[in-house]
Image (cartoon, rainbow, N blue to C red):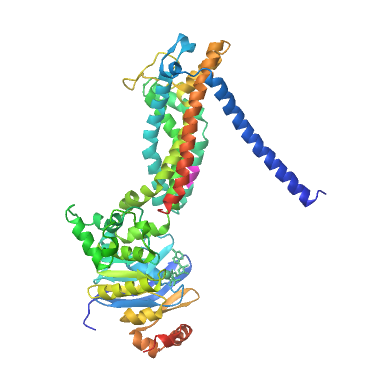
Amino acid sequence: MISRTLKNQLFITFSRLSGFFVLALLAGVIGVIAVKGMGAISFNFIFSPMQEGGLSGGIIFQIAGTIILITTALVISLPLATGAAIVKSIYWKDTRQAGAYQFFLYVLNGMPSILLGVFGFFFFVKFLGWGKSWLTGGILLAIMILPVAAISIAGGMERIPREYIDNARALGLSTPQIIRSVYLPQSFSSMLSGLFLGLARAVGETAPIMFTATVFAGAVWPDGIIENPVLSLPYHIFNLVQESYDPRAASNAWGSALVLMVFASVFSMLTIIFRLSAHEEARGS
Amino acid sequence: MTNKQTLVELNHISVTAGSHLIVDNVSLKIKEKSVTSLVGPSGAGKSTLLRVINRLTDREDGLRVEGQACYREKCIYTCCQVEDLRQYVGMVFQKPCVFPGSIERNLLFGVRHHKKMNASEIPFFLEKILKQVHLWTEVKDRLKKSASILSMGQKQRLCFARVLAVNPEVMLLDEPTASLDPHSTHEIESLIHELKQEKAIVLVTHDLVQVRRVSDELIFLSAVNGTGRVVESGTPERIFNRPEQEETRHYLSRHRIEEVKL
Ligand SMILES: Nc1ncnc2c1ncn2[C@@H]1O[C@H](COP(=O)(O)OP(=O)(O)OP(=O)(O)O)[C@@H](O)[C@H]1O
Ligand SMILES: [Mg+2]
């Protein structure tokens, strides 16, 4: 029989160790990428196109491609996620459908990203005949972001105190008018925090885009939709690591990884900032 | 008194939530140019009755409203769009609730959806309704500033102004002074006095002294086992001095009736 205090002590020690381990892991990963990556980073590396299959030159078009992909994803997922949240937390408020919808969003969120890639390949690349296209990548990443963003926006809308809704209804506003003047402005931060949380994850995804939207070399700016792939950071890293017996490839892979990490970290930070303000915003202060 | 027109009439209204009977068979009339007070213990369904009148109960889950409710002799469910009904029947709540944004945004919050106004009319309009609630001198220099910095009493007057901007004929007031200090309460009461010159007012309050001060009609509700019923109604003088029902007498005796007797 272990005494209660000993049990508590063990539990506390274990929690501390786990906490420390998680921090150490994070610091280790970031530290290694930062240290190794810094060696490759220079003005030229960021701002010039790659040469010799990535062994030299820079990653400007990988950065541009990644920005194109995530911007497209953002533009597509913003209205969809907002619409989904409106349906779930306003029109289906407190109904069984809302619960089912929530479940559906969680399932979508848990879907392995490779499956999105497979779906995208057969539907967009083959069936619609788009070939590899930045738009397919944007759409697939948008689907990845969608559930996280929708759940976050719905949460923001559900946190708005009932008095605001009652007052707006009592003033004779219709539901669409209330959506525009209460729900949307008072869940704006939740909207941004959800989108950035999704983006932080989507920006580094390789699986959904590798057969559908991105190539390793030979793409610059897209000038249409069909057969218009882009370069991208995750796919670039994926390929360079496979060549990394060559120290130049390894170094550039670390450099690209650092740039990608900066993207993801910025999105994560934006998520936190908007999440903090989301709680005040619902209350209208 | 009797030749005043009835604006709102409830006939045998019952409200149930699941198996809970909240309001049982309530009938009442709201007349123009008068203040009708609903008084009774907590849980008597006073707020619920107000919410029936402007159909705020509509989309509330599990609430069922039975009976007949009329506005100007037409059923509130068929006379007009619900948004129109709420323009004719405005409501002010217990807790002043200002929307994020400026005082001006708050004042125009409802009316801008109902009435086209030129940009040039707006300043005159704002001045008119702010003067109506005696808030003009206090806020005239900061209409573009956030409404959240106002005091509670000012916020509540802003809420009145926001409703008055829509120009309703009936105003439902659900404990409008319950969260205010005595001075602000007094200001709201004088406002109610002025408003009743042209509007029908339904006032829910726990303050019998207030009833005595502002109302023309008093409807007393009881709450037995969580169900609200009308016990008696009449002028406040009559009910305070000569209550007919035991329940009324009992309630009044617990609420320091001495102060409110004539
Ligand atoms: N949407 C709802 N669903 C279930 N029950 C409700 C709902 N709205 C009100 N009730 C119940 O109806 C009863 C009456 O509530 P109501 O708010 O109308 O009382 P009240 O007379 O205004 O009380 P108070 O003086 O405390 O404000 C309460 O028991 C409340 O729990
Ligand atoms: Mg109430």
Residue A102 belongs to magenta span:
yes
Outermost top residue:
A52
The quadrant in which residue B147 appears is bottom left
Outermost right residue:
A1
The quadrant in which residue A221 appears is top left
Tell me the chief SS of the magenta region.
helix
Residue A127: percent from left, percent from top: 39, 23
Residue B212: percent from left, percent from top: 35, 82
Please give the range of residues in magenta.
A100-104
Number of labels in the image equals 0
* For residue B41, side relative to residue A226 (left or right): right
The picture quadrant for ligand 2 comes to bottom left
- Of residue A134 and residue B96, the one placed in the foreground of this image is B96
A184 over B93 or under it: above or below: above
Residue A57: percent from left, percent from top: 45, 12
Q: Is residue A92 visible?
A: no
- Of residue B226 and residue B209, the one placed in the foreground of this image is B209
- Of residue A170 and residue B147, the one placed in the foreground of this image is B147
Residue A4: percent from left, percent from top: 77, 51
Residue A241 belongs to magenta span:
no
Q: Which residue does the image show at 60% across and 31% down from the upper left?
A: A27
B62 over A5 or under it: above or below: below
Q: Which residue does the image show at 48% across and 69% down from the upper left?
A: B20
* For residue B28, side relative to residue A107 (left or right): left
* For residue B258, side relative to residue B55 (left or right): right
Q: Is residue B240 visible?
A: yes
B180 over A268 or under it: above or below: below
